[in-house]
């Protein structure tokens, strides 16, 4: 959309971003350098160009480390994964060779930030002057895939540090529009480190709804159509779940002794909204169930083929 803004604005309303900013934030490499430029904490990252760079990195690395795609969508289309956690040098070199495209390097090495319940997200909307008209924070209780993916179970809590840090960052770069940004708390240095910036409405935006029913999509629409954005108060403790994602990822947390059966059942107390289920419109929920069964069958079939 940013690339074709001049043509699209003849028929559509959308935030007017500074040239190149959307692409810079979408690139994990450029996003990292923006964080460094404006003094925003970020997980330490290296961008190897070849196997020799990875070997040099491993000499002083503290394992485990994250091996991630700079362009995560391109990596997932090619390999089926966006990132992996590696525990030693041998595994790092093996996975690097499996995942990298030598003619167009697209992998980065990032410090692994420990802790399963220290992942935070901010969803908000910034107007033409890069002022935050709406913004809420939430804690990712569980993720899909486990530990590294999107929110599968989240709960709203107000985090003043995350709010102030995000507003400072967006004001510095002149960002306008909806934003979904992730942080992980590094207790070793007492900082919330930026791990992901999405210059768009995030897929978990309905987790973050305030006392007035405002969410980032409504704030975007109201501001672009010249109406006031009347935000309410944060809804402390509001929970939201992606049913199929959480069902798949929860066993991993149980196997790793991060979650017990009772704790898993208690974790759903207070869930106010689900990604798929709604009493007044059940078709999306049943469609999700059918697609999930198809996905599970195809995955099992592929594994059987590999064994044979």
Image (tube, rainbow, N blue to C red):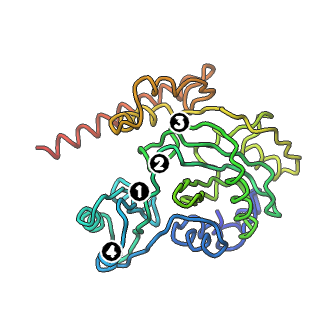
Label 2 – label 4 distance at C-alpha: 25 Å
Distance Cα–Cα, label 2 vs label 1: 20 Å
- Foreground mark, 2 or 4? 2
Disc number lying in front (2 or 1): 2
Tell me: 132 left or right of 184.
right
* Residue linked to disc 3: 153
Which numbered disc, 2 or 3, marks the residue closer to the eye?
2
Residue 107 x %, y %? 40, 68
- C-alpha gap between disc 3 and disc 1: 20 Å
- Mark 3 touches mark 1? (CB < 8 Å): no
Which mark identifies residue 124?
none
Q: Distance between the residues labelled 2 and 3?
A: 16 Å
Image position, residue 195 (x, y; %):
54, 59
- Rendered position, 240 above or below 61: above
Q: Which residue was labeled with disc 2?
A: 115
- In primary-sequence order, the first of circles 2 and 1 is 1
Q: Give left or right: position of 92 versus 144.
A: left
- Closer to viewer: mark 4 or mark 1: 4
Going from the N terminus, do you reach mark 3 or mark 1 first?
1
Residue at 47 percent of width and 43 percent of height? 143
Q: Where is residue 136 in the image (x, y as percent from the top left)?
A: 71, 45
Image x and y of residue 267, in percent: 52, 28
Residue 174 versus residue 205 in the image, above or below: below
**Which residue is the site of mark 4?**
54
Distance from label 4 to label 3 (Cα)?
35 Å
| Residue located 77% across and 62% down the image | 10
């Amino acid at each position: 959309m940013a690339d074709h803004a001049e043509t699209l604005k003849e028929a559509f309303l959308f935030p007017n971003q500074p040239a190149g900013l959307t692409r810079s934030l979408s690139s994990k490499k450029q996003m990292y350098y923006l964080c460094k430029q404006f003094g925003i904490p970020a997980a330490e990252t290296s961008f190897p160009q070849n196997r020799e760079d990875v070997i040099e990195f491993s000499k002083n690395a503290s394992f485990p480390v994250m091996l991630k795609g700079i362009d995560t969508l391109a990596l997932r289309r090619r390999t089926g994964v966006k990132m992996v956690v590696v525990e030693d040098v041998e595994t790092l070199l093996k996975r690097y060779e499996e995942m990298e495209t030598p003619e167009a390097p697209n992998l980065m090495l990032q410090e692994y930030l420990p802790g399963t319940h220290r992942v935070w997200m901010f969803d908000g909307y910034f107007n033409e002057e890069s002022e935050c008209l709406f913004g809420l924070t939430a804690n990712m209780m569980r993720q899909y895939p486990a530990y590294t993916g999107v929110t599968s179970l989240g709960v709203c809590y107000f985090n003043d540090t995350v709010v102030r840090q995000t507003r400072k960052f967006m004001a510095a770069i002149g960002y306008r529009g909806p934003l979904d940004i992730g942080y992980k708390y590094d207790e070793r240095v007492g900082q919330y480190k930026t791990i992901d910036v999405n210059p768009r409405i995030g897929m978990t935006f309905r987790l973050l709804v305030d006392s007035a029913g405002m969410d980032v999509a409504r704030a975007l629409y109201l501001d672009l159509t010249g109406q006031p954005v009347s935000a309410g108060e944060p809804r402390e403790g509001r929970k939201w779940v992606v049913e199929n994602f959480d069902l798949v990822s929860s066993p991993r947390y149980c196997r790793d002794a991060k979650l017990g059966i009772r704790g898993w059942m208690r974790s759903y107390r207070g869930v106010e909204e689900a990604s798929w289920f709604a009493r007044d419109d059940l078709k999306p929920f049943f469609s999700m169930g059918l697609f999930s069964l198809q996905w599970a069958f195809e995955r099992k079939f592929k594994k059987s083929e590999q064994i044979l």
